[in-house]
Image (cartoon, rainbow, N blue to C red):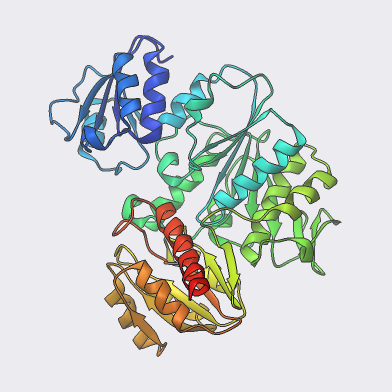
Amino acid sequence: MFTNQKIFVLGMARSGYEVSKILSSRGNTIVLNDAKEEDVQNQEQVKELRDLGVQLVFGSHPEDLLDDTFDYLIKNPGVPIDHFYVEKAKKLGIPVINEVEVAYLLIDKPITLIGITGTNGKTTTTTLIYEILNEAFPHRVHLTGNIGYPLCSFLTKIKTNDIIVMEVSCQQLENLEKFNPHIAVLTNLSPAHIDFLKSYDNYKRVKGKIFQNHTKDDIAILNIENQDVLDLTKDIKSTVKYFSSKNTINGCYIKKNQIYYYDKPILDIDKIKVSGLHNMENIMASIMVCKELDVSDDIIRKVIYEFKGVEHRLEYVTNYKGRTFYNDSKATNNKSTQIALSAFHSPIILLLGGLDRNQDFHELTPYMENVKLIVCYGQNRMKIKEYADTIEKKVEMCETLKEAVDIAYQNSNENDIILLSPATASWDQYACFEDRGIEFKSLIKEIEEKDENN
C-alpha cells in the first residue's frame, strides 16, 4: 500500500511535511501544494522535501495541478472540506484521506491504539492518559495526533506492543475511513466548528466516526451525562463503558468527594491540583482507559495528584497581590468558556474577544453570575460590548490583549480571578491560540516586574 503511486498532498504544516517524507521513501511521486508563499514555510523542511524529490507548489492553487492521474489526495486537517481541490478529487474518483489514515494503514506491528475525541477536554484527557501510561509502561507509549505530533512521525519508532495515545479532532475524523482505535473516548459534545463542518448534525456525525469500525472487541468510553453523546452512540458495536460526574453508575463516578472506579474509591478530590467539574470528567475518562490496560491504583494516584493541567487550558499562571490569573486561551468557543466560568466561585474579571465567527454570546449568560467585569478586545469587541450591555454587566472595550490585561489588573481587587477565556478564535491578531496564551502570560510578568521596579 502507498507504493509507486502518484499522490497529491494539500497543505504543508506538520502533517503535510511528515506524510510527504514517509510516502516519498516508498517510491511514490509526491506533489505538495500550499497556498502560503515559500518564504513563510519552514526552510529546512522545504529543502529536505525537495532533496527527497517532492514537487512543491507554493503561493496558489493552480486549477490544473490536480488531475485524474493521481491515486490519492491527502488533505491537511485545516483545509476546508469544500476546498475546490477536494471537490474536484471527488468528481474524479480520487480518494480523499489524511495523514492519520496513511499512518494507520502503514503500521505493521501489533500495537494498542487509544483515540480521544470530543468538543472539550480531549487535550487534557489525552495528555493525562499518556502521562499515566508512560509511568506504567516506560519507553512504550507515544503521544500523537491533534495534540501536535503527526502519527507519521512515529512510524519508524513504533515497536511491537507499543501504545499510541492519540487526540483526534473532527477535522481529522472527517477523512478517516479505516482508522480504528482499540479504545475510543468521547469526552462530550456541544456545538463547535460549525464554520468548518457546516452544521451541528454534521459535526456530530463526524465525531461518531471514531467508532465506525468498532466491534464488540473494542472499547468505547463515554460521558453518560451528555445526552448528545448517548444519542450519537446508541447503535455503535463497541463494548461501552461510562463515566459520570453526577450520578453513581456502573463505571467511574464521584461520591463523597472521591472518584470511584466500579465501587472502589480511587482518588481523593481534595488532593487533585486541577479544578473544575470538567477536569474531574477528564480524569475519570483517563482512569477508565488506563484500567483497561491494568494500570495500578498507585500509579494512577501518583500521576493525577501531580498533574497541573495542560498549557492554555484553564492553566493556573500565578497569584499576584491576591489576584489569581488563569490562561484559558484554548477556549475558542462558548462551551469552553462556560466550563471555565463554572470552575470558579470568586469574583471574575473575564477577558473576551478575538476573531468574529458569528457566535451568540448570550449562551454565556447563565454562567456569568460571578463575573464582575468583562474586558472585550479584538475584532469582535463591539459585538461583545453590545452583549454585555444587554445583560447589564460592567464592560470595558479595547483593541489589544495588552490593553485588556492592563484594564483587568487596574480594576481588580484581592481574591479576584483574572481569566483569559476568550470564547473566540485567535486568528484576528495571532497565528494560533498558543501565541495568544504565551503573550497573556508574558503580560502578567510585565505587570509584576513593573510593580517591583516602582
- Is there any visible trace of residue 273 in the rendered image? yes
Above or below for 202 versus 191 = above
At a point 33% along the width and 55% down the height, the residue shown is 430
At a point 77% along the width and 43% down the height, the residue shown is 291
Left or right placement of residue 297 versus residue 349 in this view = right
Position of residue 108 measured from the top left corner of the image (x, y, whole percent): 57, 16
At a point 51% along the width and 57% down the height, the residue shown is 312
Find the residue positioned furthest to the right: 264
Position of residue 119 measured from the top left corner of the image (x, y, whole percent): 50, 55
Position of residue 186 measured from the top left corner of the image (x, y, whole percent): 58, 50
Q: Nearer the viewer, residue 16 or 243?
A: 16
Left or right placement of residue 181 versus residue 99 in this view = right
- Is there any visible trace of residue 29 in the rendered image? no
Q: Nearer the viewer, residue 169 or 446?
A: 446
Quarter of the rendering containing residue 268:
bottom right
For the image shown, how many numbered marks are present on the structure? 0
Above or below for 30 versus 173 = above
Position of residue 381 measured from the top left corner of the image (x, y, whole percent): 30, 73
Find the residue positioned furthest to the front: 453
Above or below for 69 versus 276 = above
At a point 59% along the width and 83% down the height, the residue shown is 414
* Quarter the N terminus occupies: top left
